[in-house]
Image (cartoon, rainbow, N blue to C red):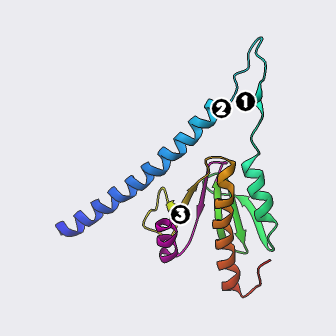
Amino acid sequence: MWRDRSRRLAGYARTLGAAARVWLIVLRIQLARRARRPVFGIGARPGPAAECAPDITAELRREILGWPGVTVAPHRYGGSEFRLGKRELGHLHGDYLADLPFPVRVREELVAAGRALPHHILPLSGWVSYPIRDADAVPGALALFRLAYERATAKRGTPTA
């Protein structure tokens, strides 16, 4: 009985640790973005810092929706969910975090290679989280979505574009 309880507690600790790591990254992303935003007020003039970074969400949506059969809908926990038929390829939480489902074996490979982090809520599942710090992180997010898409189309027996 005590072994079951200790295993459960260890699982909870891993879950909390993974969630804390991802949310600290997300917090740093948000703080860094706010620090780069100009403050406009009376007499303030926009300088080079006022130039907006490319809209990360729009770039991701445009690319992913260009793949045959992919649709987008609101995600049940907020953000945008990308689907191929009934299968979720992944979803975006705003323009700062992508979550994608994979088998546990694939998740372990992605995390070991540093391409993703364990999911911020379900770290022992196959889900991964990918923080999107800035526009430079878009190719990494797209690569994960593309991997999810290729796995889904291979399973359906349909060719990829």
> Which residues fall within the magenta stretch?
93-116
Q: Nearer the viewer, residue 101 or 33?
A: 33
Badge 3: residue crowd in 10 Å (few <14, some 14–19, many ≥20): many
Q: Is residue 125 above or below residue 141?
A: below
Q: Amino acid at mark 3?
A: Val
Residue sticking out furthest to the top: 43
- Residue contact at pointers 1 and 2, CB within 8 angstroms: yes
Q: Nearer the viewer, residue 87 or 53?
A: 53
Distance Cα–Cα, label 1 vs label 3:
33 Å
Identity of the residue drawn at 78% across and 33% down: 51
Which circle's residue, 1 or 3, is located before the other in the chain?
Answer: 1
Where is the C terminus found, in terms of image quarters?
A: bottom right
Please identify the quarter of the rendering in which residue 38 is found.
Answer: top right
Which circle's residue, 1 or 2, is located before the other in the chain?
Answer: 2
Dot 1 corresponds to which residue?
49
Q: Secondary structure at mark 3?
A: strand
Identity of the residue drawn at 32% across and 56% down: 13
Q: Nearer the viewer, residue 29 or 73?
A: 29
Numbered mark located on residue 129 in the image: none
Dot 3 corresponds to which residue?
128
Q: Secondary structure at mark 1?
A: helix
Where is the N terminus found, in terms of image quarters?
A: bottom left
Residue 109 placed where, x, y %?
49, 72
Identity of the residue drawn at 46% across and 71% down: 108
Q: Amino acid at mark 1?
A: Ala
Which circle's residue, 2 or 3, is located before the other in the chain?
Answer: 2
